[in-house]
Image (cartoon, rainbow, N blue to C red):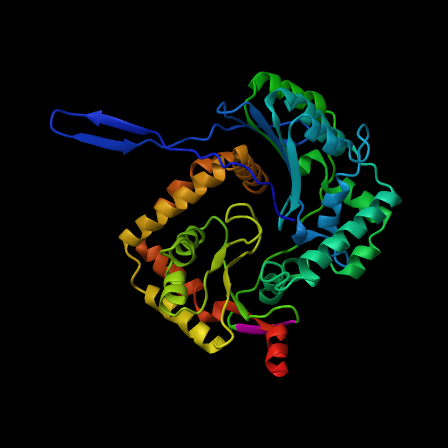
């Protein structure tokens, strides 16, 4: 379930520092540093504080180190189901009381389940920060796990699957479908939204065990972002979270993917679609390697913005489609995941265009990259990346900042990585880019999924 709150976006700007001389004026751009204070409670809870006094608001974000990827076998969709259970009541807050507490104090809240974490957050007036810390700690201590609540949320999640996937044209395409086709390891390749039979099979003991296993403070990160007093906030966090006992966290399963050595092609019939669609996915390099950051820049060059090469070829030159979506990690961004990932792009196209024509045009773009990515091209990609990164950090009153801080704390034990990302991209050379193209943007490393539009086929037959 992705974040779906609409807000005015707040942008962060770099500070310009000007030095004047008698003959000229040189302008340099100062680097913005996100304030990061990082420590751990005795029970293992990772805490990140990041002040921002630009508005009288505060964000409380709690990220648990459990996502779709490592949910129990034969319980597909369980991590997402449990996300819903977290809103059903806790020791001191009954059903709907958590939601009412936030909304009646002028705040908003949400939660989501991703590949490698499940998160919950509240954005409130800063004078309600203590209340939100108490409320999050209350449900970390224990949930109101009842059969009535479980049955109710099983129905809610099943309806969500039906509405968002089963009864929608292009439902689940490609964000839900492609990992199942492209990956080999069950942990990366199962239906993480949940098979209906698996959702029905979940029982009360499953919920209790899952909570005790994964929703412990030593499996979580807490970020507070916004307008707050540091010492006061540290005292509140210790007061409300410090006494929650830690748990024994099981070793994570092997989630590695084998190297792909042959192109895969699949067709998915869609009875509700009226135009064909195609998604092309390439397995990503290992996270935090030079090739990983190179792929971030190649994403900017190929898929992001009006000057992206795929858009220039497929939209402007060939006219096959009106637009392209693409990126690293369709359920987040290139920074907030831990395991294997795909770089992917997708689009619908006209019924009169063949798959071979579309893939032929894609291959022309990929072939044009070889030996032709210059430092000037990389500089332009870095500008685009930088803009997107700082939009992410400032968006939704700073929730993007909280997201990266928690992700880096969970996955790297180093939330201050948020301040070194731009430097990592600047280290990428044309030689590293070429090596990445050769090793990862090869046809044998990709999976192609085409939607066969049965609705369009039915209309043809009716004529």
Q: Quick check: 297 above or below 463?
A: above
Estimate the x, y position of residue 95 in percent, counting from the top left.
Answer: 81, 35
Q: Report the magenta residues as a range.
A: 264-270
State left or right for residue 220 relative to residue 412: right
| Prevailing secondary structure class for the magenta stretch in the rendered image | strand
Quarter of the rendering occupied by the C terminus: bottom right
**Is residue 209 part of the magenta span, yes or no?**
no
In the foreground, 8 or 406: 8
Q: Quick check: 184 above or below 227?
A: below
In the foreground, 257 or 377: 377
The residue that appears at 41% across and 66% down in the rendered structure is: 314
Estimate the x, y position of residue 341 in percent, counting from the top left.
Answer: 54, 56
State left or right for residue 404 relative to residue 433: right
Residue 427 visible in rendering: no
Q: Quick check: 4 above or below 237?
A: below
Estimate the x, y position of residue 297 in percent, counting from the top left.
Answer: 39, 52
The residue that appears at 81% across and 27% down in the rendered structure is: 92
Estimate the x, y position of residue 202 in percent, counting from the top left.
Answer: 82, 53
In the foreground, 357 or 130: 357
**Is residue 268 part of the magenta span, yes or no?**
yes
State left or right for residue 145 relative to residue 13: right
Residue 173 visible in rendering: yes
């Amino acid at each position: 379930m992705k974040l779906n709150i609409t807000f005015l976006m707040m942008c962060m700007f770099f500070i310009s520092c000007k030095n004047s001389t008698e003959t000229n004026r040189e302008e340099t751009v100062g680097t913005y540093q996100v304030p990061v204070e990082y420590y751990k409670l005795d029970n293992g809870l990772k805490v990140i504080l990041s002040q921002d006094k630009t508005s009288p608001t505060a964000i409380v974000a709690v990220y648990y180190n459990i996502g779709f990827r490592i949910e129990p076998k034969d319980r597909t969709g369980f991590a997402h189901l449990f996300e819903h259970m977290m809103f059903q009541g806790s020791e001191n807050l009954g059903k709907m009381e958590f939601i009412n507490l936030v909304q009646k104090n002028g705040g908003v809240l949400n939660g989501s389940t991703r590949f490698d974490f499940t998160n919950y957050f509240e954005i409130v007036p800063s004078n309600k920060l203590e209340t939100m810390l108490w409320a999050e700690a209350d449900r970390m201590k224990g949930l109101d796990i009842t059969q009535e609540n479980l049955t109710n949320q099983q129905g809610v999640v099943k309806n969500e699957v039906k509405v968002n996937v089963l009864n929608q044209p292009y439902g689940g395409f490609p964000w839900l479908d492609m990992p199942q086709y492209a990956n080999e390891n069950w942990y990366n390749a199962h239906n993480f939204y949940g098979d209906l039979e698996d959702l029905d099979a979940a029982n009360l003991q499953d919920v209790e065990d899952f909570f005790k296993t994964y929703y412990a403070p030593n499996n979580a990160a807490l970020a507070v972002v916004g307008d707050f007093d540091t010492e006061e906030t540290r005292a509140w966090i210790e007061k409300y979270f410090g006494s929650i006992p830690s748990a024994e966290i099981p070793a994570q399963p092997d989630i590695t993917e084998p190297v792909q050595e042959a192109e895969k092609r699949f067709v998915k019939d869609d009875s509700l679609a009226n135009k064909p669609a195609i998604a092309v996915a390439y397995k990503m390099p290992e996270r935090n390697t030079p090739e990983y950051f190179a792929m971030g820049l190649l994403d900017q060059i190929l898929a992001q913005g009006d000057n992206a090469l795929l858009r220039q070829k497929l939209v402007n030159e060939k006219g096959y489609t009106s637009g392209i979506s693409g990126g690293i990690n369709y359920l987040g961004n290139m920074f907030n995941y831990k395991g294997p990932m795909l770089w992917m792009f997708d689009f619908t196209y006209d019924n009169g265009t063949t798959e071979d024509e579309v893939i032929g045009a894609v291959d022309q773009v990929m072939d044009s990259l070889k030996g032709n990515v210059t430092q000037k091209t990389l500089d332009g990609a870095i500008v685009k990346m930088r803009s997107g990164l700082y939009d992410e950090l400032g968006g939704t009153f700073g929730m993007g900042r909280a997201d990266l801080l928690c992700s880096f704390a969970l996955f790297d034990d180093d939330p201050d990585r948020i301040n070194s990302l731009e430097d990592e991209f600047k280290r990428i050379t044309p030689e590293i880019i070429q090596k990445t193209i050769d090793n990862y943007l090869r046809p044998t490393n990709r999976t192609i999924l085409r939607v066969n539009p049965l609705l369009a086929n039915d209309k043809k037959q009716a004529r």
